[in-house]
Amino acid sequence: MARRFGPEQTAGLRAAQVELVDRHVAALPSQRRRELLAVRPTIDLDPTDVEVYGTAKERIGWTYAGVRAGRPVPLVWAGAGLVLTGMLLAGDQDVRPHAPALIAEAVGTLPDGVSRPRLRADSGLFSADVAYAAVAAGADSAVAAVRKPRGAGGDRVDPVDRVAQGEKDARRAGRRRSTTPPRAGRPAPG
């Protein structure tokens, strides 16, 4: 079935997606529509590996984690919960070469009247091409990248240590980050 989709059919699908997003926003209650359009839209670019079983499936590859998977790449308008565009890659395919075209499509799918969107991507998409593509499409970008602590010599901080340090900092500031109740005999902070 997918072999029947050439460039013309794909362009038709993209146009239909734009129409569906416009219709969805128009169909919202007026208060919700005003709230949604009053804030800058955030577009999430978050590829996910979906493990599959069997050897006959197409567009499947071995991921860095050693599992057979497909890699859906949705670009979602976070505030509205709408998928603006996306594609399916094999688990061993890099998203970054495809990201510029997807970003342009996603920004183009947003309804008229929204302010400058923000693109939010995870650290796997940390590249100059992705940032430039966001700016070229008329969006700002933020990429979540792991930051190495100073003086660590390139070693990453253990997540448990990071949480423990965060708890200490919060207690020092008079706040309690965890949801566990204080131990008996100790007054609750604050």
Image: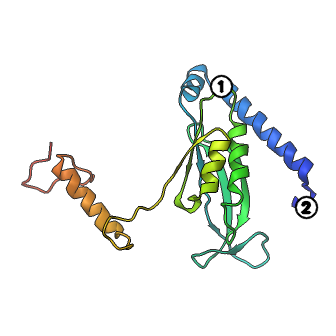
Is any part of residue 9 visible from this angle?
yes
Q: Amino acid at mark 1?
A: Gly
- Within the image, what quadrant is residue 156 found in? bottom left
Percent position (x, y) of residue 15? 82, 39
Q: Residue at x 26, y 51 (%)?
A: 177
The residue wearing badge 1 is 113
- Residue closest to the eye, 169 or 48: 169
Using the image, determine if residue 35 lies above or below residue 52. above
Residue 18 point in image, percent of width and height: 76, 37
In the drawing, does residue 16 fall left or right of residue 34?
right
**Label annotation for residue 41:** none
> Looking at the rendering, which quadrant does residue 28 occupy?
top right
Q: Left or right: where does residue 172 sit relative to residue 2?
A: left
Instruction: Say which residue label 2 marks.
Output: 3
2 or 1: mark nearer the eye:
1
Residue located 57% across and 76% down the image: 65
- Residue 140 drawn above or below residue 70: above
